[in-house]
Image: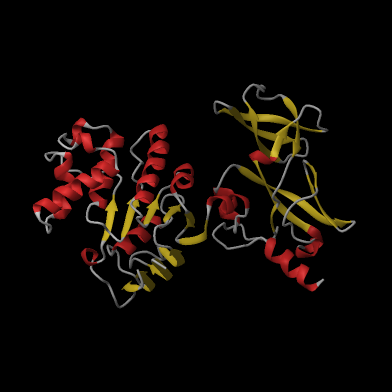
């Protein structure tokens, strides 16, 4: 295990609650990990603790098997071989691209410096811009210079703190894919902080969702989306709503009754006995709801958001519940219009109705694990 955080806690003396609270995560060598969550959730504080810039009040941080931080130990940042890329690039305006990249290589010979600078500039696609100055480059090129400078000393871990936040949306998504390719080519282990889900999905092998200092789930993007571990993750990732539902068993098959119809043939659904009277909440995402004029269930369009190839409709059912739907953009209906909808759900995500309202409380769905344990006893 390359990066290992065990029950990590960071608490400032002037604050009543920890900024990072009992976080456990592991990152394999060569993996790119991403931390996402709302502003103030603790992701940057965690990153700074890994870098050695913040003291740890409890728990351990290990790099390549070596303890670098706990309540009694704090290896200095300069001794951790950790590189950092910041959102403001932090380039020296009076230095050329190659001199900016060379800045962290002062302990090497001149020839070794030249060789390494040429290697990393070629890696980030800026070999032809080595003699230019930062103000002569685009925002995306400046960020790649910052990345090259961080990679030049061959750090054992690279930390990136919202490096694309100053760029426009289209450039951010493209650059995220480019940076992932660069990190993979360099076989660099990296931990990346962002609040943008699309960035996280584009760059991360494994993604952690944080809220109020706690890590709710550390998983790949597919699992976060289809098997969220907590209500907060389910609500934070993607577009969707929770709607009341009832589970019952009919002819050895689980049937989920929802306001948009009954769901059958669903994977990894808990048995009705998992919930009192089978009553639960089901997460219905926008891609679970299909526009179908012939469907018996009708919904009123409350809001619509044009997204090029599709609309994101917010819909209200006659029973008062709200759902969301992705609809092809050639189905251009007006706000206030009633349209037919039906559910097309492959993964049923359920939560107990007795879950705490506080989304920071871990309230896990009894899905795959419950089904497996039930199967073993029958």
Q: Is residue 199 above or below residue 207?
A: above
User: How far across and down, in percent of the image, does residue 186 sit?
Assistant: 33, 52
Residue furthest to the bottom in view is: 72
Q: Is residue 307 left or right of residue 121?
A: right
Residue furthest to the right in view is: 251
User: How far across and down, in percent of the image, does residue 260 sit?
Assistant: 77, 40
Q: Is residue 359 left or right of residue 130?
A: right
Quadrant of the rendered structure where residue 327 is?
A: top right
Q: Is residue 137 left or right of residue 370?
A: left
Residue 366, can we see it?
no
Q: Quadrant of the C terminus?
A: bottom right
Colouring scheme, one of rainbow, by chain, secondary structure, one colour:
secondary structure
Residue 132, can we see it?
yes
Which residue is painted at 43% across and 47% down in the image? 203
User: How far across and down, in percent of the image, does residue 23 sit?
Assistant: 45, 66
Q: Quadrant of the N terminus?
A: bottom left
Counting every numbered tag in the picture gives 0
User: How far across and down, in percent of the image, does residue 94 sit?
Assistant: 11, 39
Q: Is residue 93 above or below residue 375?
A: above
Which residue is painted at 36% across and 70% down in the image? 62
Which residue is painted at 79% across and 50% down in the image? 265
Query: Front-most of 186 and 4?
Result: 186
Q: Is residue 18 above or below residue 101?
A: below
Which residue is painted at 67% across and 23% down in the image? 331
Q: Is residue 325 left or right of residue 63?
A: right
């Amino acid at each position: 295990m390359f990066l290992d955080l065990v029950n990590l806690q960071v608490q400032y003396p002037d604050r009543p609650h920890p900024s990072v609270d009992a976080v456990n995560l592991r990152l394999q060598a060569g993996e790119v990990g991403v931390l996402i969550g709302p502003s103030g959730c603790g992701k940057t504080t965690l990153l700074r603790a890994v870098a050695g810039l913040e003291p740890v009040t409890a728990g351990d941080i290990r790099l390549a098997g070596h303890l670098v931080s706990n309540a009694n130990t704090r290896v200095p940042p300069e001794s951790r071989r950790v590189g950092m890329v910041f959102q403001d690039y932090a380039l020296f305006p009076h230095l050329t691209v190659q001199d900016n990249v060379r800045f962290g290589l002062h302990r090497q010979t001149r020839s070794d410096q030249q060789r390494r600078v040429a290697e990393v500039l070629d890696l980030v696609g800026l070999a032809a811009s080595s003699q230019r100055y930062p103000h002569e480059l685009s925002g995306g090129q400046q960020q790649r210079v910052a990345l090259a400078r961080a990679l030049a000393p061959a750090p054992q871990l690279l930390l990136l703190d919202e490096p694309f936040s100053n760029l426009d949306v289209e450039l951010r998504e493209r650059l995220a894919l480019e940076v992932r390719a660069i990190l993979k080519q360099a076989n660099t282990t990296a931990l990346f902080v962002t609040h943008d889900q699309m960035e996280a999905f584009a760059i991360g092998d494994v993604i952690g969702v944080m809220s109020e200092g706690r890590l709710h789930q550390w998983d790949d993007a597919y699992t976060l989306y289809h098997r969220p571990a907590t209500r907060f993750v389910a609500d934070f990732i993607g577009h969707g709503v929770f709607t009341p539902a009832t589970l019952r068993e009919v002819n050895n098959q689980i049937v989920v009754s929802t306001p948009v119809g009954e769901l059958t043939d669903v994977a990894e659904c808990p048995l009705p006995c998992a919930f009192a009277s089978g009553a639960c909440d089901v997460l219905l995402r926008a891609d679970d709801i299909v526009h179908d004029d012939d469907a018996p269930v009708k919904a009123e369009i409350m809001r619509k958001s044009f997204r090029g190839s599709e609309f994101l409709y917010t819909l209200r059912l006659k029973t008062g519940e709200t759902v969301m739907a992705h609809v092809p953009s050639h189905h251009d209906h007006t706000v206030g219009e009633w349209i037919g909808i039906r559910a097309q759900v492959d993964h049923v995500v359920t939560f107990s109705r007795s879950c705490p309202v506080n989304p920071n409380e871990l309230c896990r769905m009894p899905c795959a694990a419950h089904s497996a344990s039930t199967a073993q006893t029958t």
